[in-house]
Image: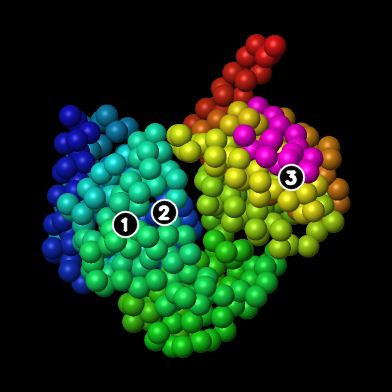
Amino acid sequence: MFKKYIQKRLETYVKKYFRKHPEVKLVAVAGSVGKTTTKIAIGTVLSQRFNIRLHEGNHNADISAPLSILGIEYPANIRSLGEWARVFKAARHRIRQPSDVDVIIQEVGTDRIGDVPHFGTYITPDIAVVTAVSPEHMEFFGTLDAVAAEELSIVNYSKLGLINRDDIDGQFAQLITNPSIDTYGTSSAAEYAVVADEVTLEGSSHVLLTTPEWGERTVELGILGEPGARAAAAAAAVGAKLGMSSDEVAAGLKKIKAVNGRMNILRGVDSSVIIDDSYNSSPLAAAASLRVLYQLPAPQKIAVLGSMNELGGLSVEAHDILGSLCDPSQLHYVVTVGDEAAKYLAPAAVRNGCQVMSFKSALEAGAFVHKVMDMQSIILFKGSQGGIYLEEAIKVILHSTDDEAYLVRQSPEWLRKKQAFFESLSNAPAES
């Protein structure tokens, strides 16, 4: 009851804030994957003209989202009445004072059915960006149709919707009742498109941007692969809709960088290159990561693939499909971490002819990669959060311990949690 009271009160403050400051635009970013990368890309582009507010983390649900919109820090002790009194005081101050921002960019997440529609009870986004519809939290949603209904609901209570044409199946268009929509992506079929001819480790240095407002123009982009290009297309679309010039948008696109744990390039030992995509994993995102790896030239390539969580009844099929995408002509090794990947992904990769090694622990996987990697290898790490933690495997082959600052889940709380998890694995009885 206490949490519900806090959430309801914060939502009321958000409504009052936008009533008092109608000049502030709200851009909301929803979708199964890619929300944070897209949010940061949008913020990078919009900051060329506007004062913006966004939270770089994934504060996208329940109490955290209203606080992020209002620009108020999450209290250290959520059970302290005194701290919440200070939060409420800060919210009232934010409402009364002249606005310090032009645009707020807010990530909108879901853990269960009804979360995204609930946001519509207290916000009306000027622009809603939907990045993807793919399996997520399937223990709650059950079917992809339910996921689509959840994620696309935000378009129907927003003034304008921007839909990723590449990662949202056209069959779900029937769920959208808002006539004010446009599409973005990496294909020419989208109204706002970013098309790259090649992928390099420095990013697709020159790409073709197409928009209804400016036609075609070549821009520089410093982010890797299809997921990065799609985030850039979304950012260009939002910039155009908010009246930015093509030069302003182009300048912003050039400044977009990878977010930690999301297709971020790091230096490894022996002149190797690490593609750190360890934040989370899903069938759509993992397939995209493999495509990027396949496009890069290297004497040796290794894919470290963790179990994909939250897939429910789709887990067997999804892991089997990802294993079937492992190409022995491209990959010297496929290394899996976690039970689901070992049971279903690994056998499919073996059927393809790949060399496969499976481990329960990311630490064991990192040690194996360190042993077999060659000079100038490229190693992709794609994994989920709970029970996988591939960022800890990356530590084993990092060029410098200083670069651990670029890895995800490195707070003292997370490190303690992971240490306990790895100790539980080492203490578990061996399987007969």
Residue identifier under label 2? 133
**Magenta span includes 132:** no
Residue in front for this viewpoint, 130 or 371 = 130
Quadrant of image for the N terminus: top left
Amino acid at circle 3: Asn
Mark 2: secondary structure: loop
**Is residue 390 among the parts visible in the rendering?**
no
Residue 38, position in %: x, y? 45, 61
Identified at 59% across, 77% down, the residue is: 207
Q: Which labelled disc corresponds to residue 231? A: none
Relative to 202, does residue 326 appear above or below in the rendering?
above
Is 234 drawn above or below residue 116 in the view shown? below
Q: Which residue is mark 3?
A: 352
From the top left corner, tell me how far across and down residue 48 is, in percent: 43, 76
* Mark 2 in CB contact with mark 1 (< 8 angstroms): yes
Q: Quadrant of residue 370?
A: top right
Q: Which mark is residue 152?
A: 1
Mark 2 and mark 1: span between their CA atoms? Answer: 8 Å
Looking at marks 2 and 1 on the same chain, the residue that comes earlier in the sequence is marked by 2
| Residue 365 coordinates in the image, percent (x, y) | 72, 34
* Residue at 45% from the left image edge and 50% from the top image edge: 134
> On the rendered structure, is 321 left or right of 122?
right
Say what amino acid the circle numbered 2 marks: Val
Mark 2 in CB contact with mark 3 (< 8 angstroms): no
Q: Provide the secondary structure element on which disc 1 rests.
A: helix
Element type at mark 3:
loop
84 relative to 191 in the view: left or right: left
Magenta region, residue range: 344-361
Q: Residues within 10 Å of mark 2 (few under 14, many from 20)?
A: many
Confirm whether residue 217 shows in the render. Answer: yes
Q: CA distance from mark 2 to mark 3?
A: 28 Å
